[in-house]
Amino acid sequence: MSEAPLSLAGLTEAPVTPDQSAPDVRHPPLVLAAMAALAGAVLVVAILGHTIASGSRFAFDSTIMLALRQDGNLAVPAGPFWLKQAMIDVTALGGETVLTLAVAVTIGFLIASRHLLAAALVFAGTVTGSIAVASVKIWVGRERPALVDHLVEVGSASFPSGHAANSAIIYLTIVLLSIQIITRRTARWFLFGVTVLLVAAIGMSRVYLGVHWPSDVLAGWSFGTLWALAWWAFGSWLRLRLTRDTRA
């Protein structure tokens, strides 16, 4: 053969190495893992959404939201004076503007690096995920919490939390791509851990600011995480198939 094929897995043009590639094809089929994760995401949201749409409520929702406000004054959040602004800053990291920029920059970098498959997967996974979240919001039609004052403005329905779901979908998709090309295990765990903490903080900020019930955020986290894993597994399977066919 004259020249090594362009890697679709990494962010360089070097041939795929064991550290850069997705799990070996001898492992359980990745396409089945993708289907299982996607089915899990749909199941979680369907069960919780049906429960809420039927008029049922979760007792822990009110308990947690009241615990995050000062006794006798539900307009004032609990904690030190600086925490409110910190939570507003954190919640912006899960907003449409920041997430759209994150996706655009990631896709632009992948295209510039000639990794068109990875760019297509990021685009497809994030866009379809956002559409799915918006559709569930319309289907369930849960109103925003009226138990406490809202500390930021909101527009759409409450369930599931778009900030929690979309931040999980987008940030986890980006980090799952990145850890495939990082050879040091410590660096992989560090990057993954920071991403998990970021997604967790964004979700918790929505409850603290009074604009989401805790169950909204839990559903968003679950759906977003499973959705990202589904696209990662599907992308890994597709990349392995294309690499194997090219080398055949």
Image (cartoon, rainbow, N blue to C red):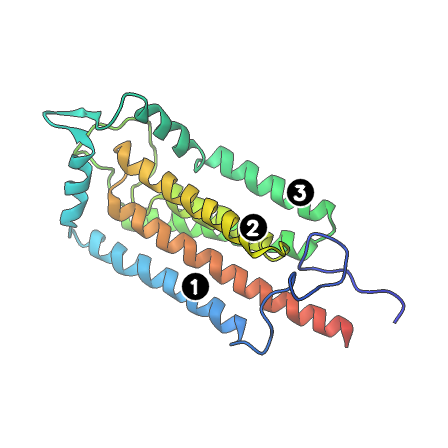
Q: Position of residue 207 (x, y in %)?
A: 27, 38
Residue 187 is tagged as: 2
**From mark 1 to mark 3, how far is it between C-alphas?**
26 Å
Locate residue 50: give its quadrant. Answer: bottom left
Locate residue 79: give its quadrant. Answer: top left
**Residue 189 seen in the figure:** yes
In the image, what residue type sits under mark 2? Answer: Ala
In the image, what residue type sits under mark 3? Answer: Gly
- Above-or-below relation of 62 to 177: above
Q: Position of residue 65 (x, y in %)?
A: 19, 37
Residue 158 is tagged as: none
Asked if residue 196 lies left or right of residue 212, the reply is right
Q: Quadrant of the N terminus?
A: bottom right
- Above-or-below relation of 207 to 242: above
Q: Are marks 1 and 3 in contact (CB under 8 Å)?
A: no
- Residue located beneath label 3 in the image: 108
Secondary structure beneath disc 2? helix
Q: Nearer the viewer, residue 23 or 235?
A: 23
**From mark 3 to mark 2, how far is it between C-alphas?**
24 Å
- Residue located beneath label 1 in the image: 38
Q: Quadrant of the C terminus?
A: bottom right
**Residue 127 seen in the figure:** no
